Image (tube, rainbow, N blue to C red):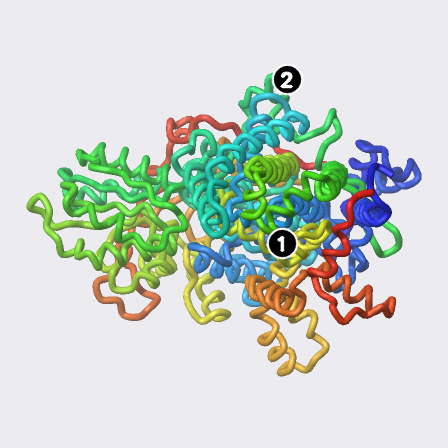
Amino acid sequence: MTKSNFTRRGVMKTGAVAGAGLALPTYLRAQESFTNNPTGDTVTLGFNVPQTGPYADEGADELRAFELAVEHLNGEGDGGMLQTFSSNALEGNGIMGKRVEFVTGDTQTKSDAARASARSMIEKDGAIMISGGSSSGVAVAVQGLCQEAGVIFMAGLTHSNDTTGKDKKANGFRHFFNAYMSAAAMAPVLEQLYGSDRNAYHLTADYTWGWTQQESIQAATEALGWTTVNNVLTPLAETDFSAYIAPVLNSGADVLVLNHYGGNMVNSLTNAVQFGLKEAQANGKQFEIVVPLYSELMARGAGQAIAGIPGSQNWDWKIENELGDRYKGTNAFVQSFGEKYGFPPSQAAHTCYAQTLLYADAVARGGSFNPCSVAEALEGYEFDGLGNGPTLYRAADHQCFKDVVVVRGKENPENEFDLVEIVEVTPAEQVTYEPDHPMFAGGALGECNPGA
Amino acid sequence: MLGLNRKDLTLMMIVAAMTLLAPIILNPFPSDSAMAQFNAGYPDLMQRFVIFGIFAIGFNILFGLTGYLSFGHAAFLGVGSYSAVWMFKLLSMNVIPAIVLAVIISGLFALVIGYISLRRSGIYFSILTLAFAQMSFNLAYSVLTPITNGETGLQLALDDPRVLDGGSSGGSLPVTQLFGLEMRATTQLEIGAWSFDFNVGYYLCAAIMLAVFYLAIRIFRSPFGIMLRAVKSNQQRMNYTGLNSRPYTLAAFVISGMYAGLAGGLMASMDPLAGAERMQWTASGEVVLMTILGGAGTLIGPVLGAGFIKYFENIFSKINDNVLHSWFAVMPDGIEDFLVTIVHPFVGKGWHLTLGLMFMAVVIFLPGGLVEGGQRIGRFVTGRRNKKAGGAEAEAARKQPAE
């Protein structure tokens, strides 16, 4: 692994070591100059996921998906979604003939640790692309780092509006949906389930994702006629939410909205059910709990508590079986994931797998690993066959637009993997917004940075 | 020379040589070999080594000399980081104003916290500092979000004013620099199969660390340092003789807070982001571990301890099952899987376990830390084995006045 570009740049900038003798051949060898230009017969991707902390379960599943994606890119295994992907640029011989290798790191669900881990991938291992992250705070921080270092960041599970809103970056791309889309998809379902006269009490994870999620849900539900009684911020590292749940029943609220994810949500929902909120009556109505961002992994963690509780998802492993061919790719992916690991993938795994394929495909279509070429290939790209139906990577903010799945916890699950039922699929048009929507305003993509 | 005696001068020279040659020393394995996994000579980690070295040296001035165990030193590191990032946002991408402000603000912060906490000693002092640090962490994490950007961490943005630089140029974020010399600029030197990274940011940190290391030696050997040692050995007796020890302890606390602020400012200068986790109690505990692991009260110990812990955090945590399988690939399948299963809990996300075991071993067998280990080896080699070997004895030998 040579970092020739670093060499050239460093030499020119500092003029410290070596003279023209060293600089000239390096210059000639690097026809294209960008950070970590892979010159050997392999290319290294960096997968930076939380292996510890409240999102560790999601991180573990993301890592499985990354490994599977790398296998498929290298032409091993059954090819998964490569068979259904609308683009045929990938041939199963790695990326542009270079075998794909990867390095992993632990973000610890902390911005600092995630950046340190990503930096070591870029500086030490020569990673050309960083992906992963199960927290929007981490995703925003690592996206900023990748922008500065001049590598592509393919965001994993990050749901905050800010990732492609006020903190969007030219080198960063997000396949996952966001809080605004969740709210837009959930609002009609909530009205249908619980009516238009409700008082909501929000418990919100205290960081960028929680804030934008709460803001989005509040705006969408207040448009229905709901009132918001209170919004309480809870620390991300919190594990016991009893103190936050206790005041809810006497607050005059009749709906509890848990803007929590991962381990947080498992704990807060369990606490809420222990406090009897699901059976309680308030304002003459049945008390309800809503979890705007849902996943099978959390449903598994929360067990019985999840029954009947609505939420939204980016994707669900049953979607092709239940809703047909529009979501093709789903079954191919579920099958190869299931064969390798013995259980169906979560939406975190799906988005990470899709992101890896999309990156490889963009490199192949653009004919270069240069981040600017990759960005150009991804911007405004329309594709299909990755399990979400027809999808657009919007050029204005590097956000994917696709259908959103609204789900509910099953009352009587048949097995431990089939815990949620699909209530409705909201088409992409209904969740699309203008790039300068107030909830997303305030940032700028800037220009793509190829590094050196 | 430089007001140091021969022993200290030698130590200073060794530290200087080690830091200046670190890019070579830390990359002992050819970059394509399987052992390259253990190379630590990449800019990010080398910067961390010296920055946490500075942090630990500063902590040692308080803990090693006065015996006051602060459990809240990460707060000063965090305050330094935030001040530095704000300087980058408001004033200029030059690191000098950022580092200066980081040191000043953390010094003031230390003055306030120290003034209150130092009214008590022993465990009560530790608890007070811990409480202050947790308070700062929680403030930074949620209440002060407009200033600290909460959990996401304070970052640069394109529309920051940057008065001296005249705002951002073009569509990309500016990078931190020292009068035009970019901190991230790296020159790579390839010699045969080896490759060495010489990074501007690292050498800036290294130069600053040598300066503050020198300052620490002078403090250790000064009359002020003797006073601090007196506080450690018997503060009550000192008070009975009519000496007010509080100004001395407060000065030590503030100096050590400023060291932490300097480390925080440098951290932000290398990577312009400040996260609240930097102030969490685990970060405060880490510097205590570094100091004890290396050898509290010794000059070089904290630096060694910092390097040791950061090495584990960054190198061992990245060994995953794939890497293990490639190591043991020569073995037959069954044995390979068995070995991977055995080693698995100790690497990757299990690096804390390995570090914990090492820490226990050091505390039990080498109470004086890594420095004591080095001394034992040294004595073993020179054949002057001393029956009374031990940290305290070795310490006494060092305590000669500077003349």
Is there any visible trace of residue A364 in the rendered image?
no
**Residue A87: x and y, percent?**
55, 49
Q: Amino acid at mark 2?
A: Leu
The C terminus of chain A sits in image quarter: top right
Residue occupying the far front of the picture: B241
The residue that disc 2 covers is B164
Give the residue at x 45% y 45%.
Answer: B128
Horizontal arrangement in the rendering, residue A354 relative to residue A2 (left or right): left
Q: Secondary structure at mark 2?
A: loop
Residue A119 disc label: none
Horizontal arrangement in the rendering, residue A11 relative to residue B358 (left or right): right
Q: Secondary structure at mark 1?
A: helix
The residue that disc 1 covers is B290
**Residue A51: x and y, percent?**
51, 58
**For discs 2 and 1, the disc positioned in front in the rendered view:** 1
**Residue B71: x and y, percent?**
51, 48
Give the residue at x 70% y 61%.
Answer: B391
